[in-house]
Image: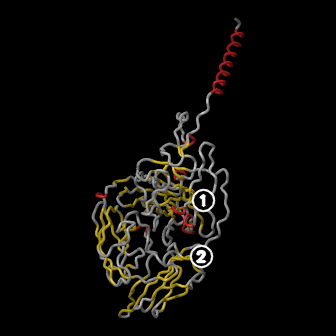
Amino acid sequence: MPDSSIGNLAGVAVIALALAGCQKEEEEEPLPEQPKLTAGATCDPAVRPVEETPETEDDADPQPICAPGLACEPLADGEGHVCGTALSLRGRVTDSASGSGIEGALVAALGELGEPVTDVVATDACGDYDLPVSVRRKADGSYAESLKWTLSVSARDYQPFPTGLRPALPIDLSDAAPAPEPVEDEDAEVEAQAPDVVDNAATHVALLSLGADAAGVTIAGTLGEGTAGTLVIAEGAATPAPYAIADASGAFTLFNVPAGAVTIRGYRQDLEVEPQAITVGTSDLADVAPSVITTDPAMLATVTGDLNIVDPGAGTVTSVVLVPASVYNEQLERGPVPLGLRDPPPPAAPDVSGSFSLTGVPSGTYKVLVAFENDQLVRDPDEGIAGTQVQEIVVERGQATAVPESFKVTGALEIVGPGKERPEEVEATPTFRWVDDSSEEGYDLVVFDALGNVTWEAEVPAGNGGEVSFAYAGPALQAGMYYQFRVTSWRLVQDERRNISRTEDLRGVFFHGEGQPVAECEVPEETAGESSSSSDTE
């Protein structure tokens, strides 16, 4: 046979094989739909939608998942998981002055003990976020508990929230309602269900810009499993130092870290973290992973001390907290308290009237704050006697540490307004009011902003019983900024001014107006729907 004939036959064979292959492909059955489970059905939280899994070998036999609008949640009795209505917190993070959304802000939910119960999510181009929250369920998938949360929010060039003068408002599960948007479900055999969302004033957060003080890079990393709630601090380059709270997975992101030598340290009850030295330049850093030394309470320190309550007024008992010295704000006399470093342990009401003890304390340098919470008591402000100063202690790893001096605590001046119970909006020229201290000869009044700057000071004449009031006469209040007024009563003793009492540390917070209204915003299509998990920010 001629070579050309052989070649023609070979070509025909190749074409035939190709056509057979195409016919075979056309005859292959389509992959089955992933089965959808209804509310109350048993589920496996490890099973993911097939489109989210890189492996394809199981696509021919996909395992069932909860239908859209449902989530696989733990049962209240701890025996497995069940499909129930998905729940998320939704809101927007904005600039307090301009009202514009902040892209890339990190948001996490904290439980009633102050512990993170979620990983962080990042806000989109409009400043919006959608934060899934897990709630234990009954067998039918309905909620089995009543929960409250607060938010932790941070962003580059902004003050963290909550901090300083700004408390976080509680978010209540009872406020959850079906989401307004429809749920898409191509599987007609399963009825789609709208997820629950909480979207109200407590889920919308306005951050305070650091302004001219904004500088530095971002440091991201993780402490690993079992470290949720750790206060992570970049110590050494600034005071107060930049800090973050490790989320439910142990991941953290520190914003605004200045250049220079810093040490990454972690603070949380029953956790000792190995300090990690880092040199910060002009570029962001990722994959920082300080190691955990121990989680054994017996290997950590105990801090003990005592206090004496005199002239208590309406107050009878108080609490004691530890604040790492590196994040303590001298002007505001406060700072973030690491999870668990409080006597009595959170969330118990204050009960200290004499001796106190804090266990499971990691090594570090701390400020010891007594009568810090709203309990009608304050640390005695008379600097002429012992036990009235904020004391600083150095805790060595695993060593018992005693606070050197006994604290003196006394009854607080009672604030009438503004800000007696919570931050309060005021007019451009607010009037400050408090209950008269009958033994005083005068008052010192100081107004701070939330960044710790003194805005205005005044000396107020003695009152005549009842209430004392005094009008603000300082610089114009900045819209969206938070302030606190603090009053100290005094009298003359041998021609020397001696302080008697003062208003409580967490009262007297106010703000004037709000920033610009939040503008309508839509995320560009090319960024809409992108993942906003913590891994995207590192």
Q: Amino acid at mark 2?
A: Gln
Q: Earlier in the sequence, mark 1 or mark 2?
A: 1
Camera sees residue 302: yes
Camera sees residue 404: no
Looking at this rendering, what residue extends furthest in the top direction? 1
Badge 1: how crowded within 10 Å, few (<14), some, or many (20+)? Answer: many
Badge 2: how crowded within 10 Å, few (<14), some, or many (20+)? Answer: some
Could you say which is closer to the camera, residue 246 or residue 81? Answer: 81
Q: Secondary structure at mark 1?
A: strand
Between marks 1 and 2, how big is the CA–CA gap?
25 Å
Image quarter of the N terminus: top right
Q: Amino acid at mark 1?
A: Asp
Q: Whole-percent x and y of residue 457?
A: 51, 84
Q: Secondary structure at mark 2?
A: loop
- Say the numbered circle drawn on residue 478: 2
**Count of marks, rendered view:** 2
The residue shown at (56%, 68%) is 208
The residue shown at (38%, 88%) is 498
Q: Whole-percent x and y of residue 97?
A: 61, 70
- The residue mark sitting in front, 1 or 2, is 1
Q: Which residue is mark 1?
A: 128
